[in-house]
Amino acid sequence: PLASFLPKLGNRQLFQRNYASTLAFIESSKDGSISKSSLSLLAAAEKLSNPITAVITGSQAEKTAKALKFFYSCKNLEKLILFEDSKLDACLPEKLTPLLVNLLKGKEYSHFVVSNSSVGKSILPRVGALLDVQPVCEVTVIKDPNTFVRPIYAGNVISTIECPTEKKLLSIRASAFAPIAEGSMESVSIKKETDIPPCDLDVNCVKTILTRNERPELTSAQNVVTGGRALKDKETFDKLLSPLADVLHAAIGATRASVDNGLCDNSLQVGQTGKVVAPDLYIAVGVSGAVQHLAGMKDSKIIVAINNDPDAPIFNVADYGLQGDLYKIVPELTEKLREE
Ligand code: FAD
């Protein structure tokens, strides 16, 4: 009742200024299923203790919204705003930014959250620039609605940031927040928006090339087996790591040196300039443990390192170290695990 009464008194600005609420940008795949990182994003948004509105875009927006509403439970989620348009399927930041800025430029939302995915990372700086707000990136802990923790200097320093700005723009490190639980949210409303602001730039997605991978998704896998430069070539990389990953139902990761040397696709890279993972088990095979690699995996719960150099820095972060020749150890370990 207050909400409808105040605008009539001409006090709308006053009402809106005091209103804290969060806008969360949800990502989904082509078939409409919600990305795991968005489920973690909503878990992080819950910690802001504000009412949450989620924005979903693309031709499958309604399917994604229904999946979220009927199969998950997010404490403060109140509303889903859908922009159902196939032009938004490719998640081009040039097309998404105007509609997000349109939603955010008023006083309604105090917080805007995106996943630290490639889509989130390309949207947030654009939205920040247009709203003239400095984003806070890669948040790993939300202490309160104004205080956030994030790693800096490749994870070597953990900084706590107090954010005095009226609006807060945050990207969330998905691996730091467990996804929201399953359930259902009958009371969540769904609103379809048809008014999509035009994009000033003539940008279109010409082609999408999907990398097919039967294995679990690297950033959300429970177990990860990572191969380093010591694996020498693509054939050895696949021949040694695939059987080990198969018995552990693990995702395969790689160092930048492996990627640069053509041992595997760059979508497997873990580290400062690759993906950040925090699985239950991380097995590093022939990986030296450079700081840039550690930045992407040192929060793993159990780290096992296989390396023939006793002074390799990876042993400093490993819970279990196997010093020796990986060409001998990996097949033996795979065989033992298969027998279990
Ligand atoms: P190496 O450092 O060459 O290590 C190979 C290891 O294998 C050695 O420790 C060796 O003892 C061991 N070994 C060799 N033979 C055997 C054997 N037979 N049995 C057992 N062990 C053996 N790196 C990343 O991984 N991810 C990033 O995101 C990333 N970002 C970067 C960003 C910047 C700006 C820069 C400058 C660098 C970045 N790097 C990154 C590169 C990083 O510095 C390292 O060069 C890289 O991680 C090394 O990869 P590696 O461990 O596979 O290779």
Image (cartoon, rainbow, N blue to C red):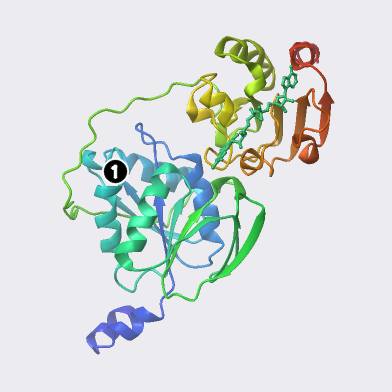
Tag 1: Cα neighbours inside 10 Å, few (<14), some, or many (≥20)?
some
182 on left or right of 101? right
The residue that appears at 77% across and 25% down in the rendered structure is 307
Q: Quadrant of residue 3?
A: bottom left
56 on left or right of 320? left
Q: Amino acid at mark 1?
A: Leu
- Queried on whether the Cβ of the residue with tag 1 lies below 8 angstroms from ligand 1, the answer reads no
Q: Residue 206: image x %, image y %?
A: 22, 30
Q: Quadrant of the N terminus?
A: bottom left
Which is nearer the eye, 216 or 204?
A: 204
Which is nearer the eye, 271 or 199?
A: 271
Q: Quadrant of residue 88?
A: top left
Q: As displayed, is residue 252 above or below residue 299?
A: above
Dividing the image into four quarters, tell me where ligand 1 lies.
top right
Q: Quadrant of the C terminus?
A: top right
Q: Quadrant of residue 338?
A: top right
Q: Residue 211: image x %, image y %?
A: 42, 23
Residue marked by disc 1: 92
